Image: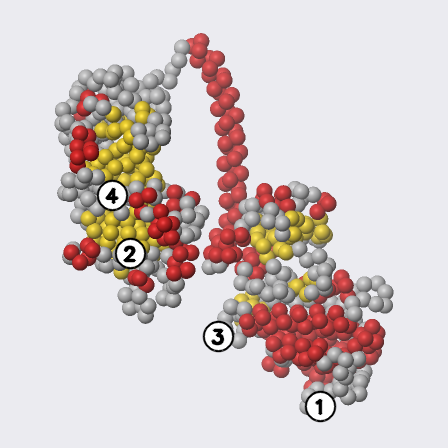
Amino acid sequence: MTAQALTHISLSQHRHKPSPHSHLIPSPYISLHISRCNCSTSCGDVDVPYPFGIGSADCYWPGFSLTCDTSQQPAKPLLVLRDLVLGSYMSFHVAKISLWNNTVRVISTNAIFTVRFSEGYFMLGNYSEAPYSLSTSNEFILLGCNLQVTLNSDSNKDFISGCGSFCPSNASETYIEKALGRTGRNCYGIGCCQAHISMSSNGLPTQLSIQKLNKNANQDLTLHPGYALIAEEGWFDRRRLSKEMVEREGIAKVQVPQVLQWEVIQGLPRPAGMKAHPGCPAEVARKLCKSKNSNCKGGSRGYVCQCMYAYDKRGSNPYLVDGCKGIYLSIGVAVGTGIIVFLLVGSFTHKRFKHRRAQMLKQKFFEKNRGQLLQQLVSQRADIAERMIITLDELEKATNRFGKSRELGGGGHGTVYKGILSDLHVVAIKKPKAVIQKEIDEFINEVAILSLINHRNVVKLYGCYLETEVPMLVYEFISNGTLYDHLHVDGPKSLSWNDRLRIATETARSLAHLHSTASVPIIHRDIKSVNILLDDTLTAKVADFGASRYVPVDRPGITTRVQGTRGYLDPMYFYTGRLTEKSDVYSFGVLLLELLTRKKPFSYVSSEEEGLVTHFSTLFTQGNLSEILDPQVMEEGGSEIEEVAAIAAMCITLRGEDRPSMKQVEIKLEGTQASRGHEEGDVRNCPRTADGSRSAELSRQYSMEEEFALSSRYPR
């Protein structure tokens, strides 16, 4: 590697000069009769078992010397390693030593490396004499853009870990900072990446290899420095570790936990072929494993001892004579203690089993309810992802444990509850009654759709709960029921014409947004008065996106299973199975008829056995709409009735290509609202189309519509 390449990689390790710790280099002398009387067995709140030790050379096996750092409160054992090439020292504070699995947990300020993006490699040091290697309980993390970094030992022959991280070509500092600042979630390669550590057969890593990715990109993203680090598995996910924090605190101040695997290597012959012969030579076993109740095992570089299975692992030490403590007590003590222990263990085991079973059940339901898909869908939107998953505890608190007093209503498929979240948002919680896969699919679809929409006339989705047999959705609470409830009331009067026209305009505006201004065009597929919610000011909120579908911008429509509500369903979609945005236009046209006539599209039948659309079309072509219009509309609507009826007639035209777009409908309705009070021309019972030539065509088309409806009742 060139000297120039080395200047572009800075390692944040603070290496100590030889003098402060020169007395820590152990003597090669190995005492076979170890006296522990004058040796410290703890430092602060950390136990220091042999072969580790503090003090003179007979207190520890060579390579396992520690010193007690009393500058810390409480005091901490200090592990110091010597670089055989540079002669410098690297130190760690020891948090825990385990004889059972031969690990030592350390706190390191040498774990983070600054990567300056020049390709090549950087030597981390040579600690081959040290009896340590990285445990598989660690992971390798890379923060940065368009880099691949690998961790190696033994001159690039032994691969330990590595991963690649990418960023979009237009990534900004803010984007990268968000990517580096994520917490509680894994890195999947955008802005940062994570990888497991594989056990090294040659000790601690000796070098980092850096490769620059995306070399031909228009924008050079290497202006942003990257960071690589080795940390105990799970630590990075639980802590916000960002570029800003590293620069603010300084790399040397960031304390990172690591787990080191240790083996006894000094003073013993190096094992060979350990995979085939995992035991120890008799000479090694006698010299190392002092307890007669211990076993000797060979590792990749040395040997370790363990107490036999029947001996207590907590207070035992196989490296000392009589160090393996028996778990068998005297009979009298054992019986009494055994009963107590049995009861305690039984109770603990039962609770743990119940907890584990509950967790497994939650995970099963989460996966069944396609939670992983949901995570992928919302992960593209950080603002959605942070609040989308709501806990059951939060929902139970919000609804007084789903009490009867919080019920808003329900039907055959479930119940809706009113709740107040911890952030004081008033919400409506939809809780299904039964497990129906079709409804689960619609549920996930609704979450995916609503996560992309932010519009004042579309109901807002706050989140969901998936770790139960039937998933639950959490919406903003809309206080005033549905348009259907307000329109179809007993008595001659219901919603005023002004409110009906405004609600129609707001609904058209939301659909136009879905079709043309949303990031991905969306077809609602089930527009009807029941799915239009009204708040306390009677503002319209379009709801229920379970049947909605995305439509790629480069495709005029998609072929799909027919879905919708009888009376509102586009006959061309019903007949061909081809779904387009004009299917929503048709359903909206039926909604306009419902507002004009106050008739229910799914149940209305005229004296001539015609449905609402066919009957309206017939009267429209005859110029005789007064027979079907709501008397309240005729009283309050004035000349606007003619304009709205003409818009409705265009929307329910049989051929989809003859219908206007929802944007055109929105503009026409807004124009009608703007001209309120300025009637133009005489009020006519027989509104005409723009070219005056539509009557015969409308009559012919709606006789065809009736034919389609009949074909659905009497299949050929």
* Mark 2 touches mark 1? (CB < 8 Å): no
**Residue positioned most to the right:** 491
Please tell me whether mark 4 or mark 3 is closer to you in this view: 4
As displayed, is residue 152 above or below residue 381?
A: above
Residue type pointed to by label 4? His
Please tell me whether mark 1 or mark 4 is closer to you in this view: 4
Mark before the other along the chain sequence, 3 or 1: 3
Q: Residues within 10 Å of mark 4 (few under 14, many from 20)?
A: some
Which mark, residue 148?
2
Camera-side residue of 59 and 525: 59
Question: In the drawing, does residue 512 fall left or right of residue 520?
Answer: right
Q: Position of residue 655 (x, y in %)?
A: 63, 80
Q: Which residue is mark 3?
A: 554
Residue type pointed to by label 1? Gly
Q: Residue at x 70, y 83 (%)?
A: 698
Task: Check the picture and name the quadrant holding the N terminus.
Answer: bottom left
Which mark, residue 692?
1
> CA–CA distance between discs 3 and 2?
35 Å
Mark 3 falls on what kind of element? loop
